[in-house]
Amino acid sequence: MKNVIRIFVVVLGLMLILSVVAYAAETAPGTVILKGAPMGGVKFDHKAHAGMAKCDTCHHASKPEKALKSDHENCQDCHTATATAPMKTKAQAAFHNPTATAGTCIDCHKAENAKGKKAPTKCAECHQKANA
């Protein structure tokens, strides 16, 4: 009887996880253009990324410096081209370091490439003048 209950709990847990991932994939906006970079904007497909990372990987909890207006605000609502008080992190630094060798986006892309997947790691693969 205990094994049946354990199996039920595991199955229930898996169903919950799958429903959260499916909900995120359905409710995530389509493609957005992250603008403001001198090299050009970045076309970001939320739906393609929804199953790979948790939403709070990018849409982090609010910081004491600035409270969130919604659960999933646009990055540039807080992270502007030049960090303005009370914010300390400018937009570029919110995504990757100045040489694009580390940071939220590039670290994930490198990890995906290590798994044998194809994720862009060169500046011009993401930043396009056409997206400005």
Image (cartoon, rainbow, N blue to C red):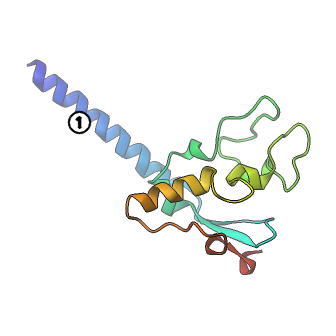
Between 132 and 15, the one lying in front of the other is: 132
Q: Is residue 34 visible?
A: yes
Q: What is the secondary structure assignment of the residue under circle 1?
A: helix
Number of numbered tags placed on the structure image: 1
**Which residue shows up at 81% across the image and 35% down it?**
66
Instruction: Work out which residue is located at the far bottom of the displayed protein and give it.
Output: 130
| Residue under label 1 | 11
**Image location (x, y in percent) of residue 65:** 82, 32
Dividing the image into 4 quarters, which one contains the C terminus?
bottom right
- In which quadrant will I find the N terminus? top left
Can you name the residue that lies furthest to the top here? 2
Q: Residue at x 57, y 44 (%)?
A: 57
User: x%, y% of residue 113?
Assistant: 45, 62
Residue at the left extreme of this rendering? 1
Residue 67 in percent (x, y) is at 78, 34
Q: Around disc 1, counting alpha carbons within 10 Å, would you say few (fewer than 14), some (14 to 19), or many (20 or more)?
A: few
Which residue does the image show at 72% across and 51% down from the upper left? Answer: 75
Q: Residue at x 72, y 49 (%)?
A: 94
Q: Is residue 104 above or below residue 115?
A: above
Residue 74 seen in the figure: no
The image quarter in which residue 31 lies:
bottom right
**Amino acid type for the residue under numbered disc 1:** Val
Q: Image quadrant of residue 62?
A: top right
Residue 125 percent location from the top left of the image:
61, 74
Residue nearest the observer in this picture, 59 or 93 = 93
